[in-house]
Amino acid sequence: MHLSVVIPLYNEEKNIKPLTCDIISILDNINIKYEITLINDASLDDTLKEINTLKTKYPNLVNIINNSKNLGQSYSLISGIQLSKYNDVLTLDGDGQNDPKDIPNLIKKYSENKKVDFVGGIRKKRRDTYLKIISSKIANHIRKFILNDDCLDTGCSLKIFKKDIFLIFPKFKGLHRFLPALFKGYGFKTMFVEVNHRKRNYGSSNYGTFSRLIYGIVDIIRVLYYIKRFKNAKLHRKS
């Protein structure tokens, strides 16, 4: 298996070194060919300095993208995935809350199920503030009910999927939260596995609860439209 690991970063100067070292140690242990792409999303701290230092030490850290302005998580992921060399892509957050120890299990489930194009993590025990947990659960239930995407935790960034499928999806700011719905809505098979969730050791969350709620409502409507348009186009091609 050849794997491209893509990690977006915003103000994660103290988190990126231990996270990257953990990922490299784990992937070296399971003996697969891989590359790592780090995207600095116009951080205001020394994140770029840290990842440039890491690049001199680790040959598998092959790509560094430095956004000139803050583009957000989805567009950072898009640029990293477009640059990736391999078709199997693994993503995770740069804050260290996704546990790299879960990566081998995701790879195993993904590799064993040849018809599966997407495997997503489900955080079994959230290590976030009470407000963030409750708001996330409400948003997940609303989204799951409307989009029927089978996903209890679309906000977990630990995912593995096919690059060529990802690139056919429309690009928008909240894309990373709707990958399960888009993969399923476009007719591809998804799977979910429970993963660990760690507390954030340094820094603070970069995503506001209220703004995420507003954008989420708009994006649910947007995704419904995209899926319906895709299915209609598919029917027209068959007729």
Image (spheres, helix red, strand yellow):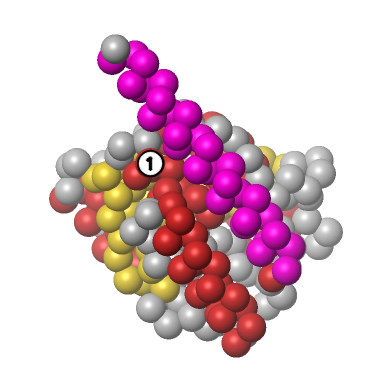
Query: Is 221 a magenta residue?
Result: yes
Residue 178 colored magenta? no
Nearer the observer, 217 or 50 = 217
Q: Residue at x 27, y 44 (%)?
A: 189
Residue 49 in the image: state x and y as whole percent.
74, 55
Looking at the picture, does residue 186 appear above or below residue 71? Answer: above
Q: Is residue 156 left or right of residue 29?
A: right
Label 1 amino acid?
Gly
Residue at the (41%, 21%) spot, across then down: 233
Hey, which quadrant is residue 66 in on the image? top right
State which region is magenta. 210-238
* Along the line of sight, the residue nearer the viewer: 161 or 13: 161
Quarter in which the C terminus is drawn: top left
Q: Quadrant of residue 212?
A: bottom right
Location of mark 1 (residue)? 185
Check disc 1 and report its element: helix, strand or loop.
helix
Image height check: is 104 above or below 190?
A: below
Q: In this rendering, would 41 be left or right of 169?
A: right
Residue 153: image x %, image y %?
44, 66
Q: Looking at the picture, how far across and down is residue 197, in whole percent?
A: 46, 76
